[in-house]
Image: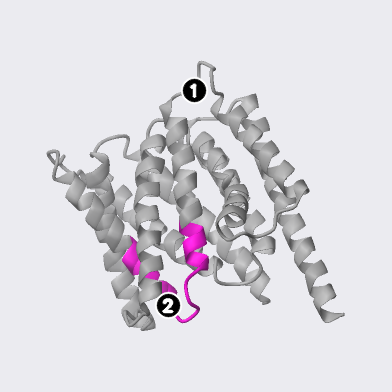
């Protein structure tokens, strides 16, 4: 398979893993405090990573100082994203939360233009603006359905944007499994320290099973999301991120009986359409630049 095909499959796998993880955590229905839940999931994930790495032999901590700085920034962004996203998830329908997250490709494009001074034409700027209007339809500011949890998801979008840009900045020699383990340990440690501020709740077998399952899925989500940012053409691969919305709609309906309203679906459609257009323009400009360079 070509690098782009591999990247597309990795993106689909990543979105499926994260959505199943979100579903299992939401199914705990507040049985445990958030930080205790994150800590226990982190323990499960870290043990699985260490067991897997013994088979693959792909963990190496002998990295350059710059790479450690990037991994540190990425870990902080992951911790913040986990907190804001999961807090919103426990208070909003799964599909609504996931729909807002679909703005990430647009935010990554805009952030790359602002931070790395990458050129962004007027067409893509217009698409980004329209995409954010789609987000407004989802969060419905000023309407009865608007609440602070929508803001939490938007903050999570910002954190995921920082995470993805940081991943892209890593040196090719950094093993993805190393980044996966550091990410899991960082979230686990931060959640463990925060969990000391409140009494722990007892863990029933059913809740323990949900945590164990979420640990397996989040391991896949971590690993695939790191791999996907290091393989193929992002302009080709990124649209497959929107498969996460399909999973969220299906699981939200089957598991929780939730189906988004018309405005949410329209807003999600606008965000997806503008994201695909933005990535199409990015790919087209790269092809044009390559032809110019060859001539």
Instruction: Answer whether residue 178 is visible to the viewer in this image.
Output: no
| Residue on which the image places disc 1 | 146
Write the start and end of the magenta stretch as one range.
163-183
Nearer to me, 30 or 190: 190
Residue at (55, 56) in percent of width and height: 115
Which quadrant would the N terminus be assigned to in this image?
bottom right
Residue 240 lies in quadrant: bottom right
Nearer to me, 152 or 46: 152
Where is residue 128? Give x, y as percent: 67, 43
Disc 2 is placed on an element classified as loop
Residue 284 lies in quadrant: bottom right
Where is residue 166? Give x, y as percent: 47, 63
Other residues around mark 2 within 10 Å, as few (<14) / some (14–19) / many (≥20)? some
| Residue on which the image places disc 2 | 175
Where is residue 106? Give x, y as percent: 62, 48
Residue at (28, 62) in percent of width and height: 185
Nearer to me, 47 or 293: 293
């Amino acid at each position: 398979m070509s690098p782009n095909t591999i990247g597309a499959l990795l993106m689909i796998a990543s979105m499926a893993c994260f959505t199943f993880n979100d579903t299992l955590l939401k199914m705990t229905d507040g049985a445990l405090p958030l930080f205790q839940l994150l800590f226990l999931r982190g323990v499960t994930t870290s043990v699985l990573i260490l067991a897997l790495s013994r088979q693959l032999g792909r963990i190496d901590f002998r990295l350059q100082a710059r790479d450690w700085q990037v991994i540190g920034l990425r870990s902080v962004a992951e911790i913040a994203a986990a907190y804001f996203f999961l807090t919103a998830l426990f208070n909003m329908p799964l599909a609504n939360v996931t729909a807002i997250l679909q703005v990430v490709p647009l935010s990554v494009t805009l952030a790359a233009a602002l931070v790395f001074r990458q050129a962004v034409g007027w067409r893509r700027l217009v698409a980004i603006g329209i995409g954010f209007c789609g987000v407004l339809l989802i969060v419905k500011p000023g309407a009865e359905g608007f609440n602070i949890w929508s803001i939490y998801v938007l903050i999570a979008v910002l954190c995921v944007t920082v995470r993805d840009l940081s991943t892209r900045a890593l040196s090719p020699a950094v093993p993805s499994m190393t980044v996966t383990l550091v990410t899991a340990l960082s979230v686990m440690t931060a959640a463990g320290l925060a969990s000391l501020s409140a009494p722990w709740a007892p863990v029933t077998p059913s809740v323990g099973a949900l945590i164990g399952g979420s640990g397996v899925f989040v391991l896949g989500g971590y690993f695939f999301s790191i791999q996907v940012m290091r393989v193929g053409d992002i302009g080709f691969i990124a649209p497959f991120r929107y498969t996460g919305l399909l999973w969220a709609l299906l699981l939200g309906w089957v598991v929780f009986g939730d189906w988004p309203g018309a405005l949410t679906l329209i807003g999600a459609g606008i965000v997806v359409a503008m994201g695909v257009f933005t990535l199409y323009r990015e790919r087209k400009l790269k092809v044009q630049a390559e032809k110019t360079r060859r001539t």
